Image: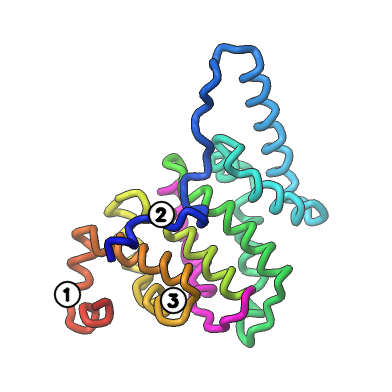
Amino acid sequence: MKQMMNMPQNLSMNAPFGLPSTSNPTSAGVPVTKDRKMASAEHLVLDLSNPDLQENALLELSKKRELFQDLAPLLWNSFGTIAALLQEIVSIYPVLSPPNLTPAQSNRVCNALALLQCVASHPDTRMLFLNAHIPLYLYPFLNTTSKSRPFEYLRLTSLGVIGALVKVDDTEVISFLLSTEIIPLCLRTMEMGSELSKTVATFIVQKILLDDVGLDYICTTAERFFAVG
């Protein structure tokens, strides 16, 4: 299990911010560049509320989210933005069973999930994200069993959001996830998912076990203990 402590580098589960600039912050170009980036981010966030521009905005924001510092608070505090992202998610529920998800639908929702992962990673929005019970919207994706690529991509990206929550050691996060029965969903993924999905699911379970609340939960009944063991 020790090798699972380190997340795979090719999975974007780190906080969605670039490293601090090594350039002189007092130079004239830095504030201008920063303001220009934020203006671009604000414009794209506004586009999320426009059905005609939404798909492109999702794509651009998800691709550039590491370039936009403080994107998470902007997403959370912009009127209607989180609702628009959740609407993207629930819009594909009808095609989960029977499994009729197309690659285009999967890609679009995964772009929305990437932005939610951004919110889940940021210290200013993490608990707001949790208190709104937004992770529950992802659980139908983790309940799917189709091994087709669109479904696997959807499960992996959803696990990335949960992984972003547990990456920071916080008992409150662990308590919330335990109350929502995340363990059985992760165990299912560990059995039938791709190697990368199995790795992320194992990481989530391990982080839960490393917390005293999580360990106590698992050891409460023999059924839970042997399910994880």
Q: Secondary structure at mark 2?
A: helix
**Magenta highlight range:** 126-149
The residue at 48%/71% (across/down) is: 139
Residue 204: percent from the left, percent from the top?
36, 63
Quarter of the figure with residue 186: bottom left
Circle number at residue 165:
2
The residue at 65%/32% (across/down) is: 38
CB atoms of marks 2 and 3 within 8 Å? no
Foreground residue among 7 and 186: 7
Q: Which residue is mark 3?
A: 189
Considering only order in the chain, which callout, 3 or 2, is on the residue closer to the N terminus?
2
Crowd tier of the residue under label 1, counting other residues whose Cα lies within 10 Å: few below 14, some 14–19, many 20 or above: few
Q: Which residue is mark 1?
A: 220
Considering only order in the chain, which callout, 1 or 3, is on the residue closer to the N terminus?
3
Q: Nearer the viewer, mark 2 or mark 3?
A: 3
Residue 29: percent from the left, percent from the top?
66, 17
Q: CA distance from mark 2 to mark 3?
A: 18 Å
Foreground residue among 87 and 42: 42
Q: Secondary structure at mark 1?
A: loop
